[in-house]
Image (cartoon, grey):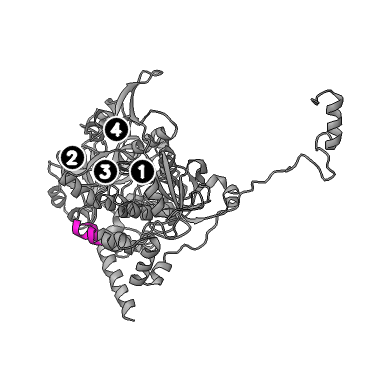
Amino acid sequence: MTSTNGKIMTASEAISRFVHDGDQLVIGNYTVGSCAELIYEVIRQQRRGLTLYSQSGIFDVEVLIGAGCVERLVTAYVMRAGGKKGGSAAERALRAGTLQMEDLTNFDYNARLVAGMHGMTFISVLEAVMATDLFRKRGFMGEDKYRVIECPYTGKKVVTVPAANPDVCIVHVQRADKFGNAQYWGAMGSVAAAALASKRIVVSCEEVVEHEIIQSSPHLTIIPAYRVNAVVEVPWGAHPTEVLGYYNFDSAMYGLFTMADATGEGLKAWMDEWVYGCEDRAAYIDRYISKFGSSALNSLKAKPLYSAPANYGAAVYSRWDRDGREIFTGLTLPEIETILGERGLLYE
Amino acid sequence: MSKPYTLQELLIIAVAKEIRDHENVVLGVGLPTTAGALAKALYAPHATLFMESGIVDFEPLVPLNHIADAHACRGFSYATDLYSAFTMTYRGFVDVCFLGVGQVDKYGNVNTTVIGDYYNPTLRLPGSGGAPSFLSYAKRTVLTMLGGSFADRLDYLTSPGYLDGGDSRDRSGLFPKGSGPSMVLTTKGVFRFDPVTKEIYLAQIHPRVRVEDVKKDVPWELKIAEDLSETPPPKDEEIDFIRRFAPNMVMGRELMLELTVANMNRKRAS
């Protein structure tokens, strides 16, 4: 299906156009409000050979690895389903030798994106990491995981990491306009850096709003329209994680996922039902309601708690007063034009 | 005579007492966030609570699910990003940080990455998160180890404590002077670090626990404080606050799950 309205499109179209086999793919969201529907669509379209960046790998990393999409993982955190006795897709893939992984600290992961976002080729990080095995044990990045240089100003040793510029970022936000201006509030994490460092950006949102709403609250915009390739409106698009102002974390559903994820077969069965078994988010929500009831879904909905409005107003909105006179000179436009002519400033 | 209390309550209070008024505090998820809420309510009303996701000066409303949980706050004063939360830590603005850990050695070095070989893991643990930076640059760090273990040699050094002990941390030149782990809390006691050797010792023991029980968990000859004390029983107001704020923490994960499932079944039956 081809969209006729510029950047507004379905998740299926956005992933098919902007996420390719072998891409470096970054999950823009950090711990909260994960772009679940976009992730599930990557899985349904069976992307292969991805280098996946996820700052705090939760179910996102688990399902993408479980579905065989990921060859390499860059992260600061992975989940473990069911504590010591359990397991995780990441652990199973590491043991099977089908996954290569690079462990970074939260800061170093984010610093790579900040460098990429600002067009630098590397960035200095916090030197204490040299005392840890994060520095000593290298994964697929090898020597390029960390390099140590001398600060040209102080002569001190400086640890650096290379910039990251992923091919594509997929990210879920509260709202966006049809041009792609994306507004997000709450835990800022590394969301803006992940998106802005990337070459292509696919935004999903709880709702598409009028451009005027965006323009009246520009401090909430974290990704500007000119960087965005696709806007996908997906209510409940982050479920079972949460979106501030829209719905809470679904701990019961997440609990079911966590139990399933303790084994490879469990995860596969769970994905058969909730990822492959639902053609889109609407079908997923239908299945959820038929299984757990609409009251379960409704109990997650956020009650309103609005931010205090901020006054963006100014004293003056026009250079012309009510009588059509320029406010500083007290002259009308014809009077000004006459003077311009008299002074020889108008070219015939 | 105060009310009967649970072990969880005792642990939360032991952690909360490490927060002093007017301090800047970074809270890891789980027990520390409840301790932060308790401290702010009862002992340290002017403490500024931080989450590493950039949520700064928040008012805890319900127990946090994770360290980016804006849903759990009654508002917060400053929404910055994760990068800035860490540079702020690097620049010395964090007084105390609380981290949950998996494996700790004699000098407070921490492993939260792997059990077994890094490249071929027996158990792949969650990894570093922000822990290495906090344990490096916060003025003090309190470690809570509820399910983990003491190890002679770590399989992986994720977050630096006192390195090889003595003055090795300060000598490395990589850390602010005087920083490092100040306490380790387990379900059996409170451990602190010798000011000179930086070796961990048992400072306080929880009620109903014997020193032999603690020693069993430690693979080296554990040093015991000469003035070893017993963790004091909670006061009623502390117990009341915790039970109202975080009934889930009081019950613990397993009991909470059992009682929630029972409630779901009751609803379904009616």
For the residues labelled 4 and 1, the Cα–Cα distance comes to: 24 Å
- Between disc 4 and disc 1, whose residue precedes? 1
Mark seen at residue B169 = none
For image coordinates 43% across by 44% down, the residue present is: A201
Residue under pointer 1: A26
Mark 2 lies on residue: B118
Q: Mark 4 highlights which residue? A: A129
Q: From where the camera sits, is residue A172 visible? A: yes
What are the residue bounds of the magenta stretch?
A: A260-269
Residue at 23% over, 62% down: A269
Image mark 1: chain = A
Reply above or below: A288 against A167. Answer: below
Residues at badges 4 and 2 in contact (C-beta under 8 Å)? no
**Residue B226 shows in this picture:** no
**Near-viewer residue (A46 or B128):** A46
The residue that appears at 75% across and 42% down in the rendered structure is: A318
Q: Residue furthest bottom?
A: B270
Quadrant location of the C terminus of chain A in the rendered image: top right
Q: Chain of mark 2?
A: B
To which residue does mark 3 refer?
A: A49
Let me know if residue A261 is in the magenta part. Answer: yes
To which chain does the residue with label 3 belong? A
The disc, 1 or 3, on the residue closer to the chain's N-terminal end is 1
